[in-house]
Amino acid sequence: MGASPPAQAFIQLSSYRIKSLPPRPIVLRIRWGDMLERHGSSVHDSGWSGIDFVSITQGLIVAECLSFRRAAKVLGVRQSTVSRRVRSLEDKLGVSLFERHSGGVRLTAAGNRFLDRARFALVQLEAAVDAAGAAGRGESGTLRVGIVSSMAAGFLRELVRSYVERHPDVSLQISEGGLREHIALISKGRVDVAFVMGTPAVPNCEIAQLWTEDLFVALPAGHALCEREQVEWQDLHEERFIVRQSDAGLAIHDHVIKRLADLGHHPSVQRLDVGRETLVHLVALGLGIGFTSEAAVAMSFPGVIFRPIAGDAEILPFSAVWSPSNDNPAFRRFLNLARVMAKKHKRRFVSRAARVASD
């Protein structure tokens, strides 16, 4: 009859002629085959037994067209089929939804109220189906990320930016903390993934190294080493160092001790219970020399100069840690993107190292 069969067609309903509808157009897409396959043709509940989605929707289309004939043409079925279904719906409801006349139909007060609410219910049902599908595909939902490093620049910042651009409907929650804190939250299902320094062995978790960053020394402005493009460990043997009392700070502390001990020196290292920015400001005040990863040097601090430490060994690895039982689709898409970007980052790093070696 010109239109596709109802089991395959998308029926679009817009701006129904129901007084209580909002003035803006409403579009309802109903895929009959999917609806009947997922939910069955009837709604079996108290007071609803035998009332089916098809009859309700055909009633809505009749209300739109104000004619059984035009509604049947839209649906691609016989007029008698539509008339029979609507009559059956009225019998089950115990009310008349339409007044029939020679020129078509018009809504009764009961029909106006019923179809108004039925339309809203079907719109909500469709929204629920769409939302469930989007969440299952990782296109919506919530992603909870724990970090220990700066996001001022570098891989992590670019990863988050790229993910947000691709998945704007996912609610991204980022928390900063230490390794032990993030692992506890991962085990409780309150954090999906944490990005940590190094490649720690974490029980009952999976871990993947994704990127590396150069180690930088933070010097107070005016320090003699500020004139250098990069700093050697030997140049630091007489300096006093300050590091944070955090997992990342302790890792750097151990690294500094080892590197200078290998050179026969015993450095003075003070551990402070302060944040990343406060530590750098203390460097500016002359309380000691600090260390930071490459991402943090994108921030500008008055009175502080950052210089890289020479040598291939001065590369800080960063890894992702997550629970193998995490089935959050949004997280799975995030992890997949991180792995793809990590491969590109590694190729750039190898290319840069080759250029440095050739110079």
Image (cartoon, rainbow, N blue to C red):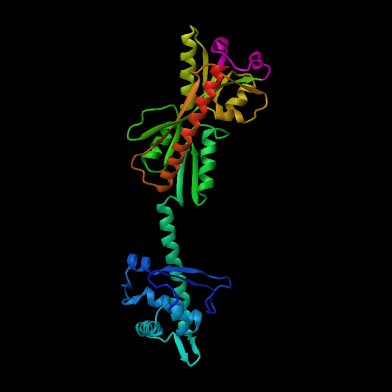
Q: Count up the numbered dots.
A: 0
> Of residues 198 and 69, which is closer to you in this image?
69
Instruction: Let me know if residue 177 appears in the view.
Output: no
Q: Residue at x 60, y 25 (%)?
A: 280
**Along the horizontal axis of the image, is 216 left or right of 97?**
right
The N terminus sits in image quarter: bottom left
- Image spot of residue 221 (x, y percent): 67, 20
| Picture layout, residue 251 above or below residue 170 | above
Q: Residue at x 46, y 14 (%)?
A: 258
| Picture layout, residue 251 above or below residue 89 | above
**Along the horizontal axis of the image, is 205 left or right of 97?**
left
- Image spot of residue 131 (x, y percent): 44, 58
Q: Specify start and end residues of the magenta stretch as a single range.
A: 221-241
Q: Residue at x 46, y 37 (%)?
A: 340
- Image spot of residue 57 (x, y percent): 42, 75
The C terminus sits in image quarter: top right
Whether 147 is among the magenta residues is no
> Of residues 169 and 183, which is closer to you in this image?
169
**Quadrant of residue 209 within the rendered picture:** top left
